[in-house]
Image (spheres, rainbow, N blue to C red):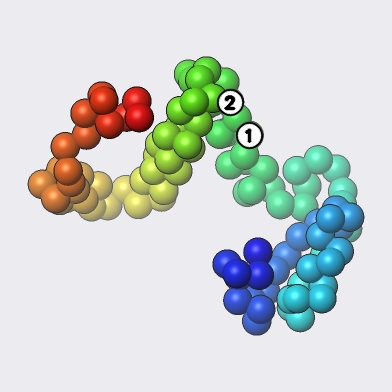
Amino acid sequence: MKACIDKESKVKTDEWVSYKPLKEHFANLVQVPSGKKGENFPQMHRVIMGFKGWLRGMHHSVKHLQAYIDEYSYRFNRSTMKEGIFDNLLKRMVLAEPCTYKNIRN
């Protein structure tokens, strides 16, 4: 985490015991007392539950897990940017390398 998050960032976690060492590295760490499941970080829990449900419903191969996560991230991000989706799609189709089944499998 230290390599990916600026030490001046505001970091907010629950009080899970493994987060306690973060206090040494992040001056702006806020630890919220744990409450009922999903109570402290409702948006995060909604995203996680949505991902788990989506994953259970469609995909079953651990071998392709990263591709599934990439697809879910794309769908989630796309849902928040409704304007410009068509223009974005056209731009990506023109600029992207072709993706064959062989590339996906490897």
The residue most toward the left is 94
Residue shown at 84%/66% (left/top)? Answer: 21
Residue 18 percent coordinates (x, y): 84, 55
Residue 39, placed above or below residue 30? above
Find residue 82 and name its label.
none
Question: From the image, which quarter does the C terminus lie in?
Answer: top left
The crowd level at tag 2 (other Cα within 10 Å; few <14, some 14-19, many 20+) is few
Residue shown at 50%/20% (left/top)? Answer: 61
Question: Can residue 60 be seen?
Answer: yes
Q: Is residue 101 left or right of residue 2?
A: left
Residue 11 percent coordinates (x, y): 70, 69
Mark 2 near mark 1, Cβ–Cβ under 8 Å?
Answer: yes
Q: Which residue was labeled with disc 2? A: 53
Residue 90, placed above or below residue 100? below
Q: Which residue was labeled with disc 1? A: 49
Task: Kindly identify the amino acid type of the residue bearing the numbered disc 2.
Answer: Gly
Q: Secondary structure at mark 1?
A: helix
Residue shown at 60%/30% (left/top)? Answer: 52
Q: Secondary structure at mark 2?
A: helix
Question: From the image, which quarter does the N terminus lie in?
Answer: bottom right
Question: Can residue 30 be seen?
Answer: no
Residue 4, placed above or below residue 68? below
Q: Is residue 75 left or right of residue 94?
A: right
Q: Nearer the viewer, residue 85 or 60?
A: 60
Residue 32 percent coordinates (x, y): 83, 61
Residue 90, placed above or below residue 25? above
Write down the quadrant of residue 76 in the picture: top left
